[in-house]
Image (spheres, rainbow, N blue to C red):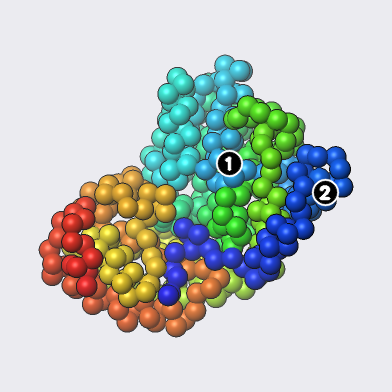
Amino acid sequence: MIYLDHNATSPLRPGVGEALARAYAELPGNPSSVHAAGRLARDAIERARAQVAAFVGALREEIVFTSGGTEGDNLAIRGLARAAAARGRRHVVTSPLEHPAVAGAVAALADEGFRVTRLPVSPAGDVSVGALEAALGDDTGLVTLALANHELGNVYPVAALAAAAHARGALFHTDAVQAAGKLALDLPALGVDAATVSAHKIGGPKAVGAVFVRRGLVLPPLLAGGHQEHERRPGTENVAGIVGFGVACQRTAEDRESEAVHVRGLRRRLEQALVAIPGARLFGAADDARLPGTTLVGFAGAPGQLVAIGLDLEGICVSTGAACTSGSLEPSPVLLALGVGSEAAAEGVRISLGWTTTGADVDALLDVLPGIVARVRAAGVEPGVVGGLRELAQ
C-alpha cells in the first residue's frame, strides 16, 4: 500500500508505538490520584506537556490536553467567544475555508445568537488582512482563522491577522492542526491567543490533541465535570495517548526541517507531472505559499470520488478533501468558496505527502493516474453518483 493521505492522518513515527505500549503497561494509575501509581501517571503527563509546549514554543502551563482537534477547536472557539460575550462582544469572524471542526463550532455559536461574518477569499484561497480589518467592529469578540488550509495547503499570515484583531480588541484563535509538523511553530511569536493541534497529524496517536491558551487568558470549560487540565477540560486524561503525543512532538521537531525539504521536492516533481495530464488544474496558492506536501488537483470531466477509488484499487491512498467529510456526495466547500463551479469542485483530489513518502511512491502514483483519469472520463459518470463506482473505476 502506498499512503499519500498525510493530511488525514500520519502513520506513527518511530518510538511512538513503543512509548504507547510502555505507558499502557507501566502507568495504570489515574493521574488525579495521590498514591504512587497516580503520581507516576501525573509525572508522565507533565513530561509530555513540556514536550508539546516546546514543540509549539509555549509555556507548559499554556497547554490543555483534549481528545483531538475537533474538541480543541470547540473548546477554544466556543469558550473564548462566550468569555468575550460577557464583555458585550458577540461578533465572530471566520472564513468559508475553515475545517469542519471550526465551521461546526462557529455554527453552534450562531445558534446561540452570535453574529458571524465570513471573510471573502480570493480565487487562490487567500485571506487578506484588509478584508479582516473591514469586517471587524467594536462588538467583535473572536476571530478564528487557520494557520494552514487542510485541503489547499495555503499558509496564512496569521501574525498580521492576529495583530489586526487585537487592534480592535478581539481575541484570535488559529487552527494549527495542519500546520503542526510541517511548519516551524512559535505560537506566542504569532501573537495568537489560542491555537489547536492534534497528535495524529504529526505521527502520534489518534484521539489526543491540545489547545494552546495564552497565559492569563480566561477560557471557560466546554464540559461540566472535574478539575482536570487547570479547570479547562474535565475528565480523566488519556495518559498513554498524551505520552505518545509528547514523543511524536519530539521526533517531529528533530526531523521537520529535513523532511520539509524532501517532501517539497517530491511535491514539485509530482505537480510538474500532474499539469501535463490534459484537463488538470491545480488549486491553491503559489508553490512557496503552501505546505510542503499538499496538492489539490482536479481533472476536468473526472469526478474526484471516482479517481480516488481507482487509485485505491491500485493500492494508493488519497482523498477528495477533509477526512471527516470523506464519502460526502457534496462538492468541496473549500473549492466552492474559491468560486469554482459545483462540477469542478466535485473533481478535486487531495494528495498529501509526508514523512513516509518516497520518490518511488510518487512514481507509482504517476504511472497509474493518467490511465485512471482517462477511464473515469470515458465512463461519463456524473459527479456524486455512487452506484457502481468501483466497477467504473476499474
Helix, strand or loop at disc 1?
helix
Do we see residue 53 in this rendering?
no
The image quadrant where one finds the N terminus is bottom left
Kindly identify which numbered label has been placed on residue 141: none
**Label 2 amino acid?**
Ala
Residue 278 in the image: x percent, y percent?
Answer: 22, 72
**Label 1 amino acid?**
Gly
Kindly identify which numbered label has been placed on residue 72: 1
Left or right: residue 10 compared with residue 211: left
- The quarter holding residue 240 reads bottom right
The residue under label 2 is: 37
Left or right: residue 168 compared with residue 250: left
Of 66 and 93, the residue lying toward us: 66
- Whole-Å distance between the Cαs marked 1 and 2? 28 Å
| Residue shown at the point (86%, 43%) measured from the top left | 35
| Residue shown at the point (57%, 16%) measured from the top left | 88
Of 217 and 3, the residue lying toward us: 3
Look at the picture and state if 29 lies above or below 108. below
Callout 2 crowding tier (Cα within 10 Å): few <14, some 14–19, many ≥20? some
